[in-house]
């Protein structure tokens, strides 16, 4: 078994999500190759874990890696928002919840589904086998304005219009089916200075398409509410995000749940009971140390935010 992903902010995750009793339940909503879960199982010998991942291929790696922990681990090959919406564990509620958003180095290096522009692969980007629309469908079927808008909104790409125009021009009579061709078209459509900038000119467009294919931000918004509902009072939830779009959603959700009154601002009279349902444990997001970034450069954009749940909302 060849592990390629380094778990980010692992020391901080272990510390902020340290169990405060025996036999507690930790749910890793983004299991990946099982790096964080393995660290938790090793560090906390009575902890029980549940690991979720939408991708069946990466889950095979995690299952093999975590096999030595036997009955302390359980696995669900599912989208995290679906899991928490349906919550198949009934009365068994988690004490600790972690999300480490996005995709794994595994996907870039071994996914063979077009996540990376460094190698030539079929343009797909679907994490879950249930998704109908692939990256190839989006790039070849979306109208120019929709393409430009999604590249701008989800990639925060300032050359989104030029890129969309080039994609629509190039796909006529010759569909864009591989990552190398997509990356080439993007490269050719942006100003020369940008082509030789700090990041590859296709980085933001690839991120945008991946977010849309997998509905990443919509799933994040819904899972925060549903997982907090399931979390035991007194339990803690940590979320590691990798870009400002994700972090904004997490920050605003935690802030909202931390306010005494959660009525909408336009509502003149409070009828929410004015309860604060979480305590924010990270006033500022936790970022990787210089040492971690040196050892694992992809960790540089990671941000960890953690809350403690104070009480159930519907009590
Ligand atoms: C950054 S990796 C996790 C790495 C892991 N924490 C480790 O240390 O090895 C994120 C994982 O979450 C999965 N994932 C992303 N979004 C998901 C979602 N909405 N539901 C379930 N799994 C998801 C991806 O397939 C990927 O394997």
Image (spheres, rainbow, N blue to C red):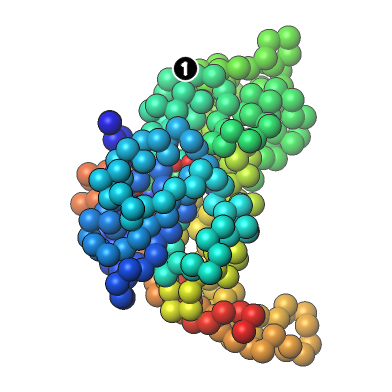
Residue 213, image x and y in percent? 62, 37
Residue at 36% x, 41% y: name it. Answer: 62
Relative side of 132 to 242, left or right? right
Camera-side residue: 194 or 240?
240
Say if residue 237 shows up in the picture.
no
Image check: 292 left or right of 246? left
Residue 237 in percent (x, y) is at 44, 67
Q: Quadrant of residue 288?
A: bottom left
**Is residue 3 something one can see in this rendering?**
yes
Instruction: Count the labels in the image.
Output: 1
Residue at the image point whose x is 39% and y is 62% from the top? 26
Residue depicted at 45% across the width and 67% down the height: 94
Residue at image position (39%, 65%) is 25
Question: Is the residue indicated by label 1 positioned so its CB lies within 8 Å of ligand 1?
Answer: no
Looking at the rendered image, the quarter that the C terminus falls into is bottom right
Image coordinates for residue 182, horizontal then vertical, percent: 57, 21
**Where is 279 relative to 115, above or below?**
below
Residue tagged by mark 1? 120
């Amino acid at each position: 078994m060849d592990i390629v992903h380094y778990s980010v902010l692992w020391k901080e995750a272990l510390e902020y999500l340290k169990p405060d009793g025996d036999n507690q339940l930790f749910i890793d909503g983004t299991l990946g190759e099982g790096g964080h879960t393995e660290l938790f199982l090793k560090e906390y010998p009575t902890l029980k874990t549940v690991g979720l991942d939408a991708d069946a291929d990466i889950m095979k790696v995690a299952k093999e890696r975590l096999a030595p922990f036997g009955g302390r681990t359980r696995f669900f090959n599912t989208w995290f928002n679906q899991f928490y919406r349906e919550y198949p564990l009934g009365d068994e509620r988690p004490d600790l919840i972690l999300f480490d958003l996005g995709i794994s180095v595994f996907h870039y290096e071994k996914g063979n589904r077009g996540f990376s522009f460094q190698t030539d692969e079929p343009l797909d980007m679907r994490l879950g086998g249930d998704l109908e629309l692939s990256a190839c469908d989006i790039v070849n079927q979306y109208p120019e304005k929709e393409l430009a808008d999604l590249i701008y909104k989800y990639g925060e790409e300032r050359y989104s219009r030029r890129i969309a125009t080039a994609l629509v021009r190039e796909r006529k009579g010759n569909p864009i089916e591989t990552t190398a061709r997509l990356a080439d078209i993007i490269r050719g459509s942006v100003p020369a200075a940008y082509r030789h900038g700090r990041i590859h000119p296709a980085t933001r467009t690839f991120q945008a398409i991946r977010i849309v294919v997998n509905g990443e931000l919509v799933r994040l918004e819904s899972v925060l509410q549903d997982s907090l509902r399931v979390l035991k009072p007194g339990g803690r939830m940590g979320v590691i995000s990798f870009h400002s779009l994700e972090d904004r959603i997490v920050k605003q959700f935690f802030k909202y749940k931390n306010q005494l009154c959660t009525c909408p601002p336009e509502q003149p009279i409070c009828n929410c009971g004015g309860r604060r349902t979480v305590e924010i444990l990270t006033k500022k997001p936790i970022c990787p140390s210089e040492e971690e970034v040196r050892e694992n450069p992809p960790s540089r954009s990671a941000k960890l935010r953690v809350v403690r749940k104070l009480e159930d909302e519907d009590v």
